[in-house]
């Protein structure tokens, strides 16, 4: 969760880009910096030939002078030692070194020793900050990726984007951008060249499909906005026992994300929604004020949503809802999982503590930290952890033990001795200790090794592109299905590609056999081992057919996305979302 504090701990709402220009009421305007600026202007005017040397010398000496005044000798000594080491490396190391890269590595290591979230953001990454906080950027509006032996391709244009308007399609291969060959470039480098100020032009040389004609497109960049609400609709009544259940999929908490949710909620109520599901699964968080505004849609004005406490008392604060709600009575279900973090946990924690709705799914990530973007010179920023946040009952969802984490970084098992009990508004007992524990746990199915391998190796996506190039249209998103013959075509295509098709049982057997050989148990049981190995050995084609019920929906969802974009893809996913379908069997009312 992010806060922007351009002045030390100023109570400022998060903003987006060019902090010094857009947050003028809170800019640091002090006499001393102005004096220094005037002085340096005079120096530059009279000694132009020495400007770089003087600036470099002053930049080095100023920190030491300031620290000497504050009697922080040990810190000054350490910084001097660090500079001396860097200088020795630069002058005498056996190979040439990238000094800037070395410095950034040192900064990253220093910040990493504090927590996983404090980080330095150099000036060249400010576009990522804008995208992270506003979900907007200047460009053509398309996801691209680099495919071995093919090149950089248009993977998925956004609905209504310039890429779509000017005729780019999934599967198109980008050959040149503004006349520059992109073959040596990475996908990230190509993406940077595609972005720019809205209203400016960028020229693409493209091969249509794979092996098609070569065309040139002159596309005018626009301000691209990725909505936080990727899908909202009334769910099919065959899944809801005949009730009108509105579903809102929220993917982030960027500027105006709460407006997206409000608009979706109002529209669903107008369509007759009797209950609401707010899906925060996989939502890694974002701006805290957007989380507060989303909670305000469902609770009375003036309700406490979250508080924050830090080492510096200036950052301590309570945040209450400021807006009139849309509906304080409509039954509400919030779905979460281990990918729900930060602002998602603020929403889920507040709804749970206020007994406003039921939380369904699995334990959330466990990131309860408030972070501030602080300028550190040369347009660089440090994302600094300044406080922890607490739910209305007083719970802190932060899991401090960073070593006891799952492979995805989410909170692991929390010993009972570390849990503390808190009471909700209506007296229900809830616990802290890391993340938000759902009121009712509903697990998601685990994908098999082969399914994950197909996705990770882009085989599902590549087949979807192939399918897209062979069809002019498909059935509506909620109805499209591959025929048995089409799935067999996918099996044939996938089997021709290189990927790990071993089952989990095969992998475990290979480990067991290796251990048996190491302990000299293999030879005396060779016949049994060989017999079991033979039974477990399955061809790619056989494994793809065995896992058809799991793999076929993944292929269908990817194909639907090519034709019907992200909203269509989610509509297709819902049909096979067993976690959601099982959650719908649970009463919305709290016990």
Image (tube, helix red, strand yellow):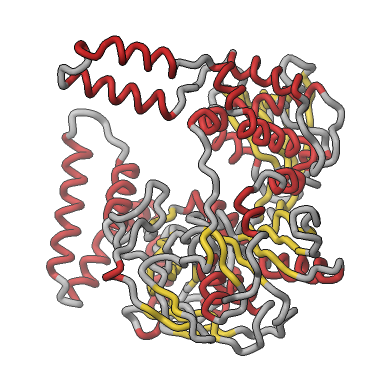
Q: Which quarter of the figure has residue 287?
A: bottom right
Q: Residue furthest bottom?
A: 302
The residue drawn where x is 52% and y is 79% is: 353
**Spot occupied by residue 46 in the image (x, y as percentages of width and height):** 39, 61
- Camera-side residue: 101 or 167? 167
- Tell how many labels: 0
**Spot occupied by residue 531 in the image (x, y as percentages of width and height):** 37, 12
Relative placement, left or right, of 470 versus 96 is: right
**Spot occupied by residue 115 in the image (x, y as percentages of width and height):** 32, 60
Residue 560 in sight from this viewpoint: yes
The residue drawn where x is 66% and y is 87% is: 300
Q: In the rendered image of this protein, does residue 306 appear above or below residue 413?
A: below
Q: In the rendered image of this protein, does residue 117 appear above or below residue 371?
A: above
The residue drawn where x is 68% and y is 26% is: 174
- Camera-side residue: 55 or 521? 521
In which quadrant of the rendered image does the C terminus lie? bottom right
The residue drawn where x is 49% and y is 22% is: 501
Residue 10 in sight from this viewpoint: no
- Camera-side residue: 315 or 16? 315
**Spot occupied by residue 534 in the image (x, y as percentages of width and height):** 41, 12
Q: In the rendered image of this protein, does residue 39 appear above or below residue 494?
A: below
Relative placement, left or right, of 531 versus 263 is: left
């Amino acid at each position: 969760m992010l806060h922007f504090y351009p002045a030390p701990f100023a109570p400022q709402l998060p903003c987006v880009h060019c902090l010094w220009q857009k947050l003028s009421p809170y800019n640091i305007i002090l006499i001393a910096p102005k004096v220094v600026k005037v002085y340096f202007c005079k120096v530059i005017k009279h000694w132009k030939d020495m400007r770089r040397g003087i600036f470099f010398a002053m930049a080095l000496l100023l920190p030491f002078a300031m620290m000497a005044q504050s009697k922080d000798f040990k810190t000054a000594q350490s910084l001097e030692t660090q500079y001396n080491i860097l200088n020795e490396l630069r002058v005498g190391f056996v190979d040439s070194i990238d000094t800037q890269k070395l410095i950034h590595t040192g900064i990253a290591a220093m910040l990493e020793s504090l927590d996983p979230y404090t980080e330095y953001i150099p000036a060249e990454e400010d576009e990522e900050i804008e995208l992270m906080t506003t979900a907007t950027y200047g460009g053509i509006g398309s996801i691209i990726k680099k495919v071995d032996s093919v090149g950089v391709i248009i993977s998925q244009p956004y609905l209504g984007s310039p890429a779509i308007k000017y005729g780019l399609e999934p599967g198109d291969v980008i050959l040149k951008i503004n006349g520059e060959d992109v073959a040596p470039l990475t996908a990230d480098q190509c993406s940077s060249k595609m972005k720019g100020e809205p209203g400016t032009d960028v020229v693409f040389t493209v091969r249509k499909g794979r092996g098609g004609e070569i065309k040139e497109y002159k596309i005018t960049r626009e301000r691209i906005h990725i909505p936080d609400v990727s899908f909202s609709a009334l769910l099919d009544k065959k899944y809801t026992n005949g009730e009108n259940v509105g579903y809102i999929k929220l993917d982030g908490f960027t500027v105006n994300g709460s407006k997206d949710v409000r608009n979706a909620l109002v529209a669903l109520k107008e369509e007759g929604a009797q209950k609401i599901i707010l899906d925060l699964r996989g939502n890694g968080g974002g701006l805290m004020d957007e989380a507060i505004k989303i909670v305000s849609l469902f609770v009375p004005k003036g309700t406490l949503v979250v508080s924050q406490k830090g080492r510096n008392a200036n950052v301590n604060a309570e945040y209450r809802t400021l807006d009139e709600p849309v509906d304080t009575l409509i039954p509400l279900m919030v779905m979460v999982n281990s990918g729900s973090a930060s602002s998602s946990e603020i929403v889920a924690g507040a709804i749970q503590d206020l007994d406003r709705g039921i939380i369904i799914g699995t334990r959330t990530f466990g990131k309860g930290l408030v972070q501030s973007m602080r300028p550190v010179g040369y347009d660089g920023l440090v994302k600094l952890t300044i406080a922890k946040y607490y739910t209305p009952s007083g719970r802190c969802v932060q899991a401090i033990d960073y070593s006891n984490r799952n492979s995805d970084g989410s909170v692991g098992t929390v010993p009972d001795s570390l849990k503390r009990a808190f009471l909700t508004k209506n007296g229900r007992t809830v616990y802290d200790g890391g993340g938000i524990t759902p009121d009712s746990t509903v697990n998601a199915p685990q994908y098999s090794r082969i399914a994950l391998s197909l996705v990770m190796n882009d085989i599902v996506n590549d087949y979807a592109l192939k399918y897209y190039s062979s069809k002019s249209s498909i059935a509506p998103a909620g109805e499209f299905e591959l025929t048995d013959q089409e799935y067999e075509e996918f099996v044939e295509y996938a089997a021709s590609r290189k990927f790990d098709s071993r089952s989990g049982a095969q992998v475990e057997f290979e480990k067991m056999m290796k251990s048996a050989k190491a302990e000299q148990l293999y030879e005396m049981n060779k016949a049994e081992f060989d017999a079991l190995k033979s039974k477990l050995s399955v061809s790619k084609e056989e494994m793809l057919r065995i896992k058809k019920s799991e793999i076929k929906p993944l292929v269908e969802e990817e194909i639907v996305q090519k034709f019907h974009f992200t909203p269509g893809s989610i509509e297709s996913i819902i049909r096979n979302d067993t976690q959601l379908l099982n959650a719908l069997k649970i009463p919305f009312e709290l016990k």
